[in-house]
Image: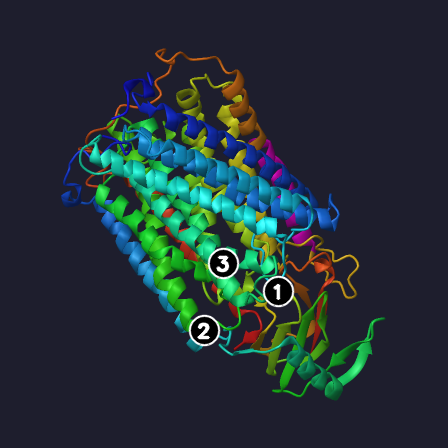
Amino acid sequence: MSSLSPPAHKIWWKEPIERVEIMWIGICIVWGLLMTFMMPYWHVVGKQNLSNEAYRITPAYFQKKAQEVVDKHTVRVETDQKIPVVAPPVGSDVYLVARLWEWWPILELKKDQSYRLHISSMDWQHGFSLQPANINAQIMPGYDMVITVTPNKAGTYSVVCNEFCGIGHHKMVGKIYVKE
Amino acid sequence: MATNNEFRTCPDTGLLFHKPAETLMRLNAVVAVVFLMFGGIFGLLVGLTRWPAVHLLPADTFYLVLTSHGINVLIFWVIFFEVAVLYFCSSTLLRVRLATPRMAWLGFALMLIGAVTNNIAVLSGRSSVMMTSYVPMSAEPAFYLGLILFAVGALIACFVFLGTLVIARAEKTYEGSLPLVTFGALTAAIIAIFTIASGAIILIPTFLWSVGYISNIDPLMYRVIWWALGHSSQQINVAAHVAVWYAIAGVVFGAKPLSEKVSRTAFLMYILFLQLASAHHILVDPGVSSEWKIFNTSYAMYLAVMASMIHGLTVPGSIEAAQRKRGFNKGLFEWLRKAPWGNPTFSGMFLSLIIFGFIGGISGVVMGVEQINLIIHNTIYVPGHFHATVATGTTLAFMALTYWLVPILFRRKLMLAGLAKIQPYIFGLGMSGVALFMMGAGTLGVPRRHWDMAFSGATMPYDFPAAAYTLMGLAGASVVLAVIGGAIFILVVVLSVFFGKRLGDTEKSAVPMIAQPVTSYEGIGIGSIAIPGTLVLAMVFLASFVLYYFVNWKYLAQTWGLS
């Protein structure tokens, strides 16, 4: 009888299992356990983990915090839109605002130094996508996501939006400088 | 038992068709193909826009077409076809009347009305919110309403299927346990009910929000519950297309499972673990803890992955065993070399299995790792992955089954058989290209759901490396190839169904349509190993999997420190 018909032996659960199947199931279990182990293991030894730190906030509150840092640590403005470039002290709280359709402000960080980066959206969902480092995260209104970032290479990075956010989605590109 | 003139016996296969069920199967399958055609045309437009050198559509039309493409193929095509599969696996395989055909008609009507309503909402241009419709971006109420009506219709179809199983048991139309293929369909139906319940929990409030009755939907809650709908709906496809793989192995080779126990347990594991694995969509969201993410994506997802890895061994394993029993017992791969590669039912099914496993399966597990997701989330790698799973795995398996079903269900000879013969190769090659090139571009950071990777009009545009443009161009060319493959399928099916040479109710076709079942797998293989060829294939798969998995950890280790 083929798979289209009821099993030929009514008591099929007592039939012996094919040897190759048993071997394969064993391999799958071991591989699954190894993959399960890798995630907590990386939390211990790996350098790329998201923190569990996040806060429920209102967009207005987040905007206010971002503005405070901008007022304090702006070193210059760039482009026709006079976007502030913020160089925050090492280890401090830095705010990146996602809104239709910009990442605001521009940040200037130091290589191999850590910063507490807060990201949140003022309106719809956005996607934080740091290029070419290719670090990606989901950004939502009402949630302040805190990631401690440690840039490992100097250069000019772009923040692309990779969650669809309407007709100007493709214009939403921000900038982060990393200095030696 | 209903009256006898409600049934007909297929002269080619000996299958017993309940005529009201048969009409519903035909109708669901035909409507499915119509939605595949719509979705496919929109897919071509998406592909031609994301091909940087072509960049066909303006931004607003692109997002509209992308929304429509996703919903039509990911939801309407597969679920209409799956309803036909459910009715076939219950009524036909169990030789029983379909439960409450009138309710089944109501289900069909609701699904159709829902699908049309949703399409109108999208095509009107005010619901370009993508298939996921993440709040607080809102669509027209008709967008959600259409999906809800469609889901209610699909739910009715699931219960008609379950009712038919009950009748078959009560009327003793079969002996012992359900056939494995029906068991697989039952798995799909149970997952479908879970999926639709999750959909109701999130889409009904969102609909009420869109009409102004509810003031706020939390975006994180939306994502968590929506993905219990969004990912589980793809698990319906997996369960259904694995059932179709087993069915085709039975039809073409008369294969029975190596052991019923293993194959059935693997299906059961889908029900127990797949839904929780929806968590892997939330891996880089704020407000969800690492413990939750790891718990749901490790024990749950890996047990579901294990189920797929088991099917990945047992389906080709049963084909190998049946072929060896038929005399192709030499060496490692005589069984595979001598397989009917010119039969699109077989070639489509086997390509579906290989591409689903090697490209879709491996990439899916790798990007479902909490930390690795950081370098993949929302890049075009993600659609690359699911074009290997759904567009190739599910769709190609359904296409393969359709080639077998057209003469049996519609009593029409397949037209353009020569084209049908090469169709799975064209479609499979095209879709593999789509998947692999998009995955490649994704590792370079190219975003998904994005109109212009050159960021025209942006104040501070980013320059993607030239390789990313090349890969997106290759993906675009692959889209064209895949669409040609899809178009051949639709052409063959539509011409055959409406203009194919009629086969009488008693006339047999020239070639046998179903293989004699193989009764035992005694005395095959090399030494004590019955299926050495499949074992070698499985080891190649495992080696690719392990290698690719650790390569991605290495990529991750090279980026910024995050904690």
Badge 3 is on which residue?
B202
Q: Give the secondary structure at mark 2.
A: loop
A51 vs B479, left or right, is left
Q: Give the secondary structure at mark 3.
A: helix
Disc 1 residue type (three-letter): Gln
Which residue lies at the image location 75% right of the left edge and 86% below the top edge? Answer: A71
Disc 2 residue type (three-letter): Ser
Badge 1 is on which residue?
A125
Badge 2 is on which residue?
B289
Q: Position of residue A136 (x, y in %)?
A: 58, 66
Report the magenta residues as a range.
Answer: B466-485
Q: Which mark is residue B131?
A: none
Quadrant of the drawing holding the C terminus of chain A:
bottom right
Scheme of image coloration = rainbow
Q: Main secondary structure of the magenta part?
A: helix
Label 3 close to label 1 by CB (< 8 Å): no
Disc 3 residue type (three-letter): Ile
Nearest to the observer: residue B553 or residue A82: A82
Estimate the spatial distance between the alpha carbons at disc 2 and disc 1, rounded to whole Å: 19 Å
Q: Hey, which residue is sitting farthest right in the picture?
A: A80
Quadrant of the drawing holding the N terminus of chain A:
top left
Query: What is the chain letter for disc 2?
Result: B
